[in-house]
Amino acid sequence: MAVPEEVRRRVEALRAEIRRHDHLYHVLDRPEIPDAEYDKLFRELVALEEAYPELVTPDSPTQRAGAPPAEEFRPVPHAIPMLSLQNCFSLEEFREWDERVRRAVGDPEYVCEPKLDGLSVELVYVDGVFTLGSTRGDGRVGEEVTANLRTIRQLPLRLFPLDGKVPRLLEVRGEVYMEKAAFRKLNEERAKRGEPEFANPRNAAAGSLRQLDPAVTASRPLKLFLYHVGRVEGLELRTQVELLTTLPKLGLPVNPRWRVCRTVDEVEAFYQELLRERERLPYATDGMVVKVNDFRAREALGEIARAPRWAIAYKFPAEEAVTRVREIAVQVGRTGALTPVAILEPVEVSGVTVSRATLHNEDEVHRKDVRAGDWVVVRRAGEVIPEVVRPLPERRTGDEVPFRMPTHCPACGGPVVRPPGEAAHRCENISCPARIKESIRHYASRRGADIEGLGEKLVDTLVERGLVRRISDLYRLRKEDLVPLPRMGEKSAENLLRAIEGSKGLPLPRLLYALGIPHVGERAAELLAEHFGSLERLSAAGEEELTGIRGVGPEIAASVRSFFQNEENRKLVAELVALGVAGKGAPARGPLAGKTFVFTGALDGLTRAQAEKLVESLGGRVASGVSRNVDYVVVGRDPGEKLVRARELGIPLLTEAEFRALGGG
Ligand code: IVH
């Protein structure tokens, strides 16, 4: 049966439209139509292809998945070998390479690109149609992975024409990779199913692409960037810049983060830029590739030992290193949580010496199966605390000792419990010296009360000598307590006392954070301070009111509640208030002292900021939302929802004139 001409035309039109939207969505991140619209186009194409199977072509967007599993990977020779790159690890080494290039070709222009940590592949397009895809293999012969590559949505099955035509032949090369977030998610899912996790995004990408069953590859979130070509016919590319700007026009994805550099200084500046950005980039990168831009200059430079002379990988410092675990110690935090910590033989990671790494909790130690004596991979990414990534079981001798969580606190000998539903074991003794030390340290820390001169060692001494048992004791220290302590003199004792005294004026949010209430970080502390305005009010708050605050979830609410229900903590708060550490922003002197105001609608004679300043200058405070703690709601022109809420709660309403009168005009 002949296919009607209008069906043929409709199928072609649908394919062109779907290709365009695939490109917009997967390559440019700029979808033009909602998913539902796209699905409609796609379903129409599927229906037509089902009705007229003779119209199905391998480059149809419907043909990405669905190829049957292969028996083995077919070898594919690369017409032009896929080379590797020489490396350098420092500016000095890079300079030497640059000098060699300059001697050979004069004044070169470089193109710098992030070095992607994935798996390199070659895609062959014949007359614009994706016909063959292979891995690098040994550089001369790779493995055929065409069906697997087809499942990568960024890979065009057919190229867009350029000036009305597509190249006769295009062998294009690049990297298949997995984004860091997708890698973490994949590993989490695998852990849940009890499957082995991938060690890094590169292994995950390689493992996903080298699958005999393309359906498995299709289920993995692989991505693609192209950066090089093999044979090209019917298209002229003379420089890397031309290559990087032409490939996207054909629909091929290119990493936009590249730069032309003319001097070593410019190269170094871009390197430093990428290094700072590294953590935030969605993909893993282990360095920067510097390439001579001009292809004729590349020919003149040639290659050596399977690597081109015209390019070099300027590597970033390793984020991972291998070292031995001396022991697994257990640390007691200020909340009593017991954290297993790997004590390591010191090793340099990203330019910093690391001698301990967190293991988070008991489950984590067992999941990773880290044992005392193990060789392990440690990782330090950006600001993050170093962590043990995985052990190297192949290096085990049999003398390694599996970890067991102690049944008694290593600091005070008290019993250790694991509350149901929690990952952490806890020491429940609130007088545990380790807990006290940590809570004092946290209180004195930069982002807390910021007490200069109260360092770790001194905290240890103060707690061990019984001079400090809780935070309030800091404010009772006298000079004669301090002077006899090691490394302490008259002068430093006076300075410390002055710093402690100075912390009495601490703003309320900082004080709340410094108290170290579990789950109350800086953000939650701000929200709580804004809502309650004083330590006393917060300590009397019920759980319902707490959860009513936007941004305060049930976990924080329960934690705040239980903190202030604890007898010891209540005593602490009372003492702090008595000692004058109430947290600034608390009810002060003035006609509006202790009163909380909320504004809704516009005022006539004052801006909102001026009105808020006025309240504060008179000792009151301003909240952003209406709750039972609010004393007055000032109603201006065009009031909003807050007025409704105030009426519901029966909170006194003030006109602007009344408000002014209250403030003394
Ligand atoms: S250019 C011979 N550019 O690094 C020149 N390679 O260690 C072809 N790689 O096999 C490579 N990102 O898999 C080039 N922007 C980039 C790259 C890159 C990652 C990989 C590639 C290569 C390996 C060499």
Image (cartoon, helix red, strand yellow):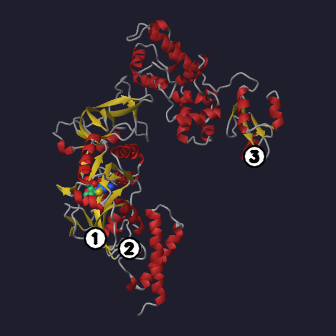
Mark 1 Cα within 10 Å, few/some/many (few <14, many 20+)? some
Q: Residue reaching furthest bottom?
A: 1
Circle 3: residue type: Val
Circle 1: residue type: Pro
Residue 656 at what x, y percent from top left?
Answer: 81, 37
- The tag on residue 158 is 2
What quarter of the picture does the C terminus occupy? top right
Circle 2: residue type: Arg
Mark 3 Cα within 10 Å, few/some/many (few <14, many 20+)? few
What quarter of the picture does the N terminus occupy? bottom left
The residue singled out by tag 1 in the image is 69
The residue singled out by tag 3 in the image is 644
Residue 11 at what x, y percent from top left?
Answer: 45, 81
Query: Residue 132: in sight, yes or no?
Result: yes
Q: Name the secondary structure under disc 2.
A: loop
Residue 470 at what x, y percent from top left?
Answer: 49, 19
Q: Is residue 635 left or right of residue 379?
A: right
| Lower sequence index among marks 1 and 3 | 1
| Lower sequence index among marks 2 and 1 | 1
Label 3 beta carbon less than 8 Å to ligand 1: no
Q: Is residue 618 left or right of residue 12?
A: right
Residue at 55% of width from left, 29% of height from top? 510
Residue at 23% of width from left, 59% of height from top? 300
Q: Name the secondary structure under disc 1.
A: loop
Residue at 24% of width from left, 49% of height from top? 103
Q: Is residue 176 left or right of residue 589?
A: left
